[in-house]
Image (tube, rainbow, N blue to C red):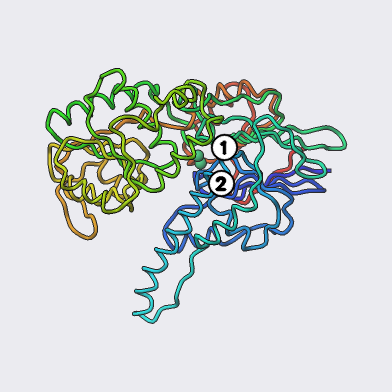
Amino acid sequence: MSVRIKFLGGARTVTGSSHLVSTDKSQVLLDGGLFQGHRDEFYRLNSTLNYNPHKIDALVLSHAHIDHCGNIPTLLKKGLRSKIYTTAATKDLSRLMLEDSGKIQEEDVRYLNKINRKLGLPLRKPLYTKKEASAATKRFRSLSYGQRFCLAKDVFVTLYGAGHILGSAIIVLEIKDKRRDIRLGYAVDLGRNDLPLIDDPVIPRNLDYLMLETTYGNRLHAPIAEAKVKLKEVINRTIERKGKVLIPSFTLERTQEVTYFLNELLKQKEIPAIPIYVDSPLATDITELFKYHLDYLDSQTRQEVNEGRGPFEFLNLTYIRNQEQSKRLNNDKRPMIIIAGSGMCESGRILHHLKNNIEDSRNTVLVVGYMAQDTLGRRIVERVPVVRIFGIEYELNAEVAIINAFSGHADKNELCDFVSGCLPLEKIFLVHGELEQAQGLFDALSQKGLSAYIPSRDEEVLLN
Ligand SMILES: [Zn+2]
Ligand SMILES: [Zn+2]
């Protein structure tokens, strides 16, 4: 008998995580993530499957980030018939994330087809619509952390807390072989110790093989506590100038982490009680799920929420769904904090707030997340003197402050420590990272005498 892993996506890159584990009897897919990229490449990479989805016995999903769950509706359209196993929190969060992804694709295609129609070019279709995304989530089944479940004749799964985002899981497969049992771990993505809101990652012991993320395989993060100190400094100096603090933020986890720290700073009277707005219907819905899935929060947050002093509801904090209410913030000249998506300033309500506030030097744009190349967010980070928003040029006079300490991914040392807890480990497959980051971790693991390997996309390896 042979056990094989085919690295379908998220190999030598960070997006499109998906890996196929095959035995002679069964096939299990780990994640079905969306590749990000420019329009044509996005469509081509996500709609081309280099395996037969009919043959999959089970799909196990690690967490609700779109680079892990975002292509599941496409897989179903192409014939995947299996159930999708994940935690209850991920099941609910994925529904919101997938519906939003479907909606964005429909809007993008509608805009593009307007142009194509005029030019007589062929019309496009989205990978999937919002409706198809909703239908896909009906296939999801939830498993508890620590519950051992039979996925196929010869494969069992157990999920453990990954400490990355709400409901995130490290997946451990036990594969029954004639000669021996194989324990294969999948820590993609892996969180960090001491993140607010959720428990630290659990270390799965006695693994034979491990698939490990390497987003920051060659970097070291500042401690998360630094985020709070910097947040306080930036807010206080902006208030002194009577300005507004604009925080472009990812809707899932980062927004809730920011409100967590703001709540802490307010309770400790480290910042004055100015209005705080989460201006995003999606972030508002996601936060509702954080309150609903209390079991997935750490004990401190759970207790605070139960006592009514938690990070999701406090004096001064307002969630905005309504567009009119969002627009009214433009005329409100008081110092305030506005948290809005999208995280990289490519779309969403943050664009309106930037347009209205970026030319005023009293204001601050506070960057709390990763800004990819060729995004407006990256240009703001680079402090270019003039930025284009909705086709109009604006001078970037506002302060640009960057807090790097927010990160939901383990860094080089944290990844190495994690690996040490999973031994004996015959081999560690390094995925979900640019080559330079994967190589940095490869070198560090090799120095410890561990055998690591950086697979390429669509490469297949034999485990025994
Ligand atoms: Zn993630
Ligand atoms: Zn990821």
Which quarter of the image is occupied by the N terminus? Answer: top right
Q: Which residue is mark 1?
A: 188
Answer above or below: position of 91 versus 192.
below
Residue 336 image position (x, y, % from top left): 21, 36
Q: Is residue 211 left or right of residue 353?
A: right
Judge by depth and name the residue closer to the eye, 223 or 4. 223
Looking at numbered disc 2 in the image, what kind of residue is underneath it? Ser
Looking at numbered disc 1 in the image, what kind of residue is underneath it? Val
- In this rendering, does residue 104 appear at all? yes
Q: Is residue 191 left or right of residue 120?
A: right
Residue 176 image position (x, y, % from top left): 82, 37
Q: Are marks 1 and 2 in contact (CB under 8 Å)?
A: yes
Quarter of the figure with residue 120? bottom left
- Dot 2: few (<14), some (14–19), or many (≥20) neighbours within 10 Å? many
Q: Secondary structure at mark 1?
A: loop
Name the residue furthest bottom: 120
Q: Earlier in the sequence, mark 1 or mark 2?
A: 2
Q: What is the count of numbered marks?
A: 2
Which quarter of the image is occupied by the C terminus? Answer: top right
Judge by depth and name the residue closer to the eye, 447 or 305. 305
State whether label 1 is within 8 Å of ligand 2.
yes
Query: Residue at horizontal 56%, vertical 39%?
Result: 89
Residue 313 image position (x, y, % from top left): 37, 32
- In this rendering, does residue 438 appear at all? no
Name the residue furthest top: 268
Query: Residue at horizontal 59%, vertical 21%?
Result: 448
Q: Secondary structure at mark 2?
A: loop
Q: Is residue 335 left or right of residue 161?
A: left
Which mark is on residue 17?
A: 2
State whether label 2 is within 8 Å of ligand 2.
yes
Residue 214 image position (x, y, % from top left): 52, 35
Name the residue furthest front: 307
